[in-house]
Amino acid sequence: MGDSTTRRGVRAGVWITAVVVAGIGLAAALVALLLEQTYVLSFAADSDTLIVSHAPAGSCDSVVWERVTETATTVSIDIRSIGPIPGIPRNAMQEECVATFNLDAPLGDREVVTANTLP
């Protein structure tokens, strides 16, 4: 009797683990589906500060991350937000958000690259 109970417990544990892993996978897939690059409207540099005006897929509260990557010749802006579910109509009024980044060095002659400028 104890052996049968142990097997049922192990089977239940395996099923619970499988359901949890599947749930995490579905949640990650949904987030990946809804994650969108924001549209950079403009930017300005003041010494080693870069101020970026952008329009996210949702509202300013939906911005998930804001990141700048620097090289000797470029500064890449990467701002992403969670957008609405595909197929759902979007609000015609787009919010304009502002992000401020501290650069390692002044912008100078470096090119600013955004998702809008990538091929």
Image (tube, helix red, strand yellow):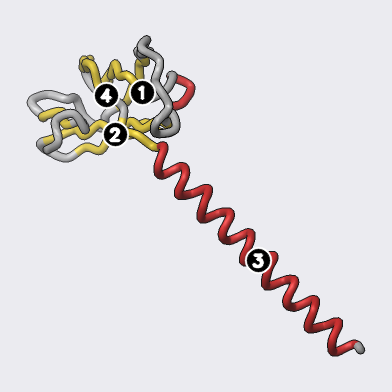
Residue under numbered circle 4:
39
Chain-order first, disc 1 or disc 2:
1
Q: Give coordinates of residue 86: x percent, y percent.
A: 39, 34
Q: Give coordinates of residue 85: x percent, y percent.
A: 44, 33
Helix, strand or loop at label 3? It is: helix
Identify which residue is drawn at 43% across, 19% down: 60
For the residue marked with disc 2, what is the amino acid? Asp
Q: Nearer the viewer, mark 2 or mark 4?
A: 4
Looking at the rendered structure, which numbered label has been put on residue 78?
Answer: 2
In three-dimensional space, the C-alpha distance between marks 3 and 2, rounded to whole angstroms, equals 35 Å
Foreground residue, 115 or 58? 58
Residue under numbered circle 3:
17
For the residue marked with disc 1, what is the amino acid? Pro
Foreground residue, 85 or 118? 85
For the residue marked with disc 3, what is the amino acid? Thr
Q: Is residue 5 shown above or below 119? A: below
